[in-house]
Amino acid sequence: MIFVIGGTGRMGLALLQRLAELDAPVRALAHSPASRAKIEGFGAEAVDGDLDELDTFEPAMKGCDRVFLLSPAEPNQPEREKAAIDAAARAGVGHVVALSVMGASHNATVGFGRWHADIDDHLAASGLDYTIVQPSGFMGVHLLPVDTLKGQGHWYGMTGDGVSGYIDVLDIASVAATVLTTPGHGGKRYELTGPEAISMPQAAAQLSAIIGRDVTYIDMPAANFRANLTRVGLPDWLADSIVGLYQVIREGHGATVTNTVEELTGQPARSYREFAEANKEAFRP
């Protein structure tokens, strides 16, 4: 039995769908009636629990031999996920697959990278068999600022001409499903990217061709971009982390491209053009 923590976000739902296609037995943590309905919609067993109620972890995992671990990126993410790892060890789980980030390091300039380095080290030292999945930036984040794109045809950012090997969450889910259902992944760390590294101006040009409307990428100074993020309601810690991540890309440190998705799943990773085509209605006015 596979236990999924974080099964009702975009990434988690993609994983539940892929596991359902593989007829894998799945139980997932549900924190509300709405999340329970989503989980059960994929034929999985939903069990009540919450990431902030640590005593719900261990009973929910009983009888499961594999765990997929994903939680929201927040300052308390390390405490939450380390507690889940400890609960998995007490519950007799054999293998934990954790979603981390590419570039996770205690010296990372981005908060996400430091948090995941802490979690990754804790998992590696837990005595459990483990696999750490480390994707690059998600293509799906480009669906978030669609209001200015729809209304103005403008796409604001601060990455300049820096490139990144953006990846579709569907490919991350396929890799996670493969790791959870096939042997030979213990102790491995997999870096995942899309098939190419592209810049935001290049992404805007591809999107323009697909939706039939000019999309202009407008590069901003970091301070102005951060001010825009907080103006729309993002907390300071998240605004700082996004600015730090985009600065890394701007400086040319996001260009890594791997073939790991195809090596593990037998299918090439989706290109940005394929992602944009699949989501074109979300970008159109």
Image (cartoon, helix red, strand yellow):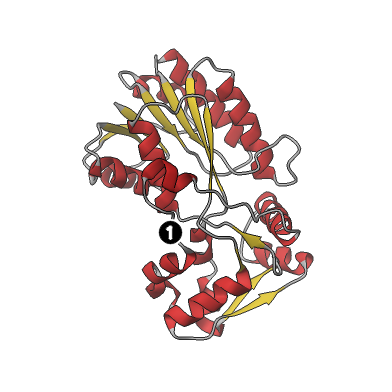
Task: Answer with left or right where residue 73 lies relative to residue 237.
Answer: left
- On-image quarter of the C terminus: bottom left
Q: Nearer the viewer, residue 212 or 122?
A: 212
The tally of labels here is: 1
Q: x%, y% of residue 73?
A: 57, 44
Q: Residues within 10 Å of mark 1 (few under 14, many from 20)?
A: many
Q: Please say if 29 is above or below 103.
A: above
Q: Nearer the viewer, residue 144 or 37?
A: 144
Q: Nearer the viewer, residue 44 or 120?
A: 120
Tell me the residue at 43%/64% (across/down): 275
Type of the residue with mark 1? Arg
Q: Please say if 132 is above or below 257.
A: above
For the question of whether residue 10 can be seen, the reply is no
Tell me the residue at 45%/26% (across/down): 96
Question: Mark 1 falls on what kind of element?
Answer: loop
Q: x%, y% of residue 254?
A: 66, 54
For the question of whether residue 274 can be seen, the reply is yes
Q: Which residue is mark 1?
A: 270
- On-image quarter of the N terminus: top left
Q: Nearer the viewer, residue 151 or 173?
A: 173
Task: Answer with left or right where residue 2 lies relative to residue 228.
Answer: left
Q: x%, y% of residue 115?
A: 65, 37
Say which quarter of the image contains residue 160. bottom right
Q: Please say if 244 is above or below 210.
A: above
Task: Answer with left or right where residue 38 lies relative to residue 100.
Answer: left
Q: x%, y% of residue 39?
A: 29, 42
